[in-house]
Image (spheres, grey):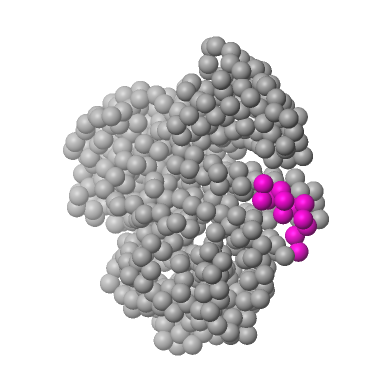
């Protein structure tokens, strides 16, 4: 349908490797094409509106990966697949993968800042997969044109996505990772919602430090009018003195426990109860019914200047180590609307705003942590945050896992954090372990009322966090591989040097790549008493097996025989370590 509806007869086709062909139409033309390092790089000149189309045979395609927050990873029809993008919403990157996990098509356009929409899906008529980028609006005005990158070699889809993501943002700097970004977090949000205070936070923070957390994220509720789950009081960003009579002193006391302090802010939200409303409401014409407040339009220089100074002031006045910056995607309510400011495009304005925030915060606190959240995870703004966090999914360990792994494939240089982890404290400690295992490939954020948490839950959390911290170098810096996205990533692994960490989330067979591996850490998150595996190593080897967490932890070490296939005797909701001979 995409081809039939968009002037098929006027498209000029260029043949690419692996049966892929590129079509251009309207004022869009191919001006340069080169192949290097397994990538085809194409320069597209756009002297006006046009289109770029990628088409290839379906083959054994099983699903399509994209960085947006779409619910599925299957194969949409070409009249259904849509992903709007800009600097603070998704990115024009995608990958079609086969049932064996290899990429059939992996591509990325470098138009990461401005507003656009990627269209994609299965062509019923042609039995092909089609991707279409309409080149219109600001995309048609880019004097330098667009660059398109396509992977030209067969490789696992995860590696292909990373290659494309790195290529399209190759010239953009990477924000150095703060110390706190790589350590477990205590978050107040799910633990207490807006019902927080100095006393509540200090009590929980002491327990969090014992469990292995190294920072406290003070979330929504610290600010004046921060009650009721809505945002009619947002805009002034000063503490509620009934809850926080001296926020600066609280930061100092938390620092005394070796805990960094990060504060939540939603800078674009403007409530009618705020003192700033009279001064700024003319720059916030849109009223959000769901948030019950106005949304500031970043295309105005007055808005950007105010928000930059606000973020810098918070870090300076309250002795903060970083900011959790929320609701940035709210700016997209102005996408496509005429601007009365100095910038026409929302994505371009947000890039200017976030660059200004990052620079100002760094002047106040060099090495500060800045956290963004899905869906504003575009490579265009990766330079301005060292942390990207999974989207809200309270108690949904499966969605947390999916979101984290999606981010691990897309992010370059940023540290990926889990959505804050919560569970039912009246359930078995296994409920806590299941949530932690779902977040294992991101930095865990614990968000429970820790003072009242049962001792058995505390012990389980401390044990898993202890293993996570010991393996954090592998988990954060290692190469990620995973099962098929369409199946929800039923298994995942991280490898660095001779250490391989594998998590089994479902009943599928684990594929173990053991060449060169000396230390194998396996998490049984399936609930099964043993895990089926396949190994690429032809020779059988012996391994010492030790269960390090769970009810069987500390029992006598055993021996396991690792052949081409077999079963690993690892108890449910446990972590085991195997040292290969």
| Residue at image location 31% in from the left, 49% down from the top | 111
Residue 461 is covered by the magenta coloring = yes
Q: Position of residue 171 (x, y in %)?
A: 26, 48
Q: Locate the N terminus and report the quarter of the image it occupies.
A: top left
| Residue at image location 56% in from the left, 47% down from the top | 469
Q: Is residue 518 visible?
A: yes
Q: Position of residue 204 (x, y in %)?
A: 66, 66
The image shows residue 435, relative to residue 242, as above or below, that is above
- In which image quadrant can residue 259 be found? bottom right
The magenta segment is: 452-463
| Residue at image location 58% in from the left, 45% down from the top | 468
The image shows residue 367, relative to residue 304, as above or below, that is above
Left or right for 268, reference 169: right
Nearest the eye: 379 or 465? 465
Q: Position of residue 303 (x, y in %)?
A: 37, 76
The image shows residue 298, relative to residue 499, as above or below, that is below
| Residue at image location 69% in from the left, 44% down from the top | 434
- For the stretch drawn in magenta, what is the main secondary structure? helix
Nearest the eye: 401 or 541? 541
Number of labelled discs?
0
Residue at the far top in the pictured view: 539
The image shows residue 29, relative to residue 365, as above or below, that is above
Q: Locate the C terminus and report the quarter of the image it occupies.
A: top right
Residue 318 is covered by the magenta coloring = no
Q: Is residue 7 visible?
A: no
Nearest the eye: 130 or 392? 392
Left or right for 454, reference 446: right
- In which image quadrant can residue 505 be found? top right
Q: Position of residue 246 (x, y in %)?
A: 55, 83
Left or right for 52, reference 279: left
Residue at the far front in the pictured view: 556
Nearest the eye: 547 or 435? 547
């Amino acid at each position: 349908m995409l081809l039939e509806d968009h002037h098929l007869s006027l498209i000029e086709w260029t043949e690419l490797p692996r049966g892929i062909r590129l079509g251009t139409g309207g004022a869009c033309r191919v001006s340069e094409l080169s192949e290097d390092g397994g990538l085809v790089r194409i320069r597209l000149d756009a002297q006006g509106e046009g289109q770029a189309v990628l088409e290839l045979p379906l083959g054994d395609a099983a699903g399509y990966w994209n960085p947006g927050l779409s619910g599925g990873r299957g194969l949409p029809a070409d009249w259904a697949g849509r992903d709007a993008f800009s600097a603070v919403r998704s990115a024009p990157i995608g990958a079609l993968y086969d049932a064996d996990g290899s990429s059939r098509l992996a591509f990325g356009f470098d138009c990461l800042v401005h507003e656009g929409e990627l269209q994609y899906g299965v062509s019923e008529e042609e039995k092909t997969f089609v991707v279409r980028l309409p080149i219109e609006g600001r995309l048609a005005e880019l004097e330098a044109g667009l660059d398109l990158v396509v992977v030209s070699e067969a490789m696992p889809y995860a590696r292909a996505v990373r290659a494309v993501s790195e290529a399209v943002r190759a010239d953009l700097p990477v924000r150095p990772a703060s110390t706190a970004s790589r350590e477990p977090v205590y978050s107040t949000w799910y633990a207490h919602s807006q019902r927080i205070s100095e006393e509540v936070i200090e009590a929980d923070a002491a327990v969090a430090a014992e469990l292995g957390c190294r920072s406290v994220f003070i979330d929504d509720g610290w600010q004046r009018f921060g009650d009721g789950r809505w945002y009619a009081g947002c805009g002034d960003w000063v503490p509620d003195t009934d809850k926080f009579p001296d926020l600066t002193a609280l930061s100092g006391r938390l620092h005394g426990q070796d805990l960094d302090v990060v504060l939540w802010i939603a800078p674009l939200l403007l409530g009618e109860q705020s003192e700033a409303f009279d001064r700024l409401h003319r720059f916030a014409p849109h009223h959000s019914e769901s948030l019950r407040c106005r949304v500031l339009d970043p295309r105005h220089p007055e808005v950007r200047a105010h928000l930059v100074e606000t973020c810098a002031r918070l870090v300076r006045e309250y002795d903060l180590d970083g900011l959790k910056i929320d609701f940035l995607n709210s700016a997209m309510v102005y996408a496509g609307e005429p601007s009365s400011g100095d910038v026409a495009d929302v994505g371009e304005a947000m890039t200017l705003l976030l660059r200004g925030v990052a620079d100002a915060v760094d002047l106040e606190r060099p090495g500060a942590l800045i956290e963004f959240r899905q869906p504003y995870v575009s490579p265009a703004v990766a330079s301005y945050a060292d942390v990207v966090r999974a989207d809200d999914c309270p108690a949904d360990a499966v969605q947390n896992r999916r979101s984290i792994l999606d981010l691990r494939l897309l992010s370059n240089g940023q540290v990926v954090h889990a959505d804050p982890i919560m569970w039912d404290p009246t359930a078995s400690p296994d409920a806590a372990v299941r949530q932690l295992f779902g977040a294992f490939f991101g930095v865990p954020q614990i968000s429970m009322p820790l003072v009242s948490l049962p001792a058995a839950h505390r012990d389980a959390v401390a044990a898993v966090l202890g293993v996570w911290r010991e393996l954090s170098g592998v988990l954060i810096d290692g190469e990620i591989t995973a099962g098929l996205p369409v199946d929800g990533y039923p298994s995942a692994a991280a490898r660095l040097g001779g250490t391989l960490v594998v998590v089994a989330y479902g009943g599928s067979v684990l594929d173990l790549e053991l060449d060169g591996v000396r230390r194998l850490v396996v998490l049984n998150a399936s609930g099964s008493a043993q895990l089926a595996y396949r190994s690429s190593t032809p020779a059988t080897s012996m391994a010492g097996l030790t269960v390090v967490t769970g009810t069987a932890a500390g029992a006598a070490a055993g021996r396991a025989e690792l052949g081409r296939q077999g079963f690993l005797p690892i108890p449910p909701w446990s972590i085991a370590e195997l040292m290969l001979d």
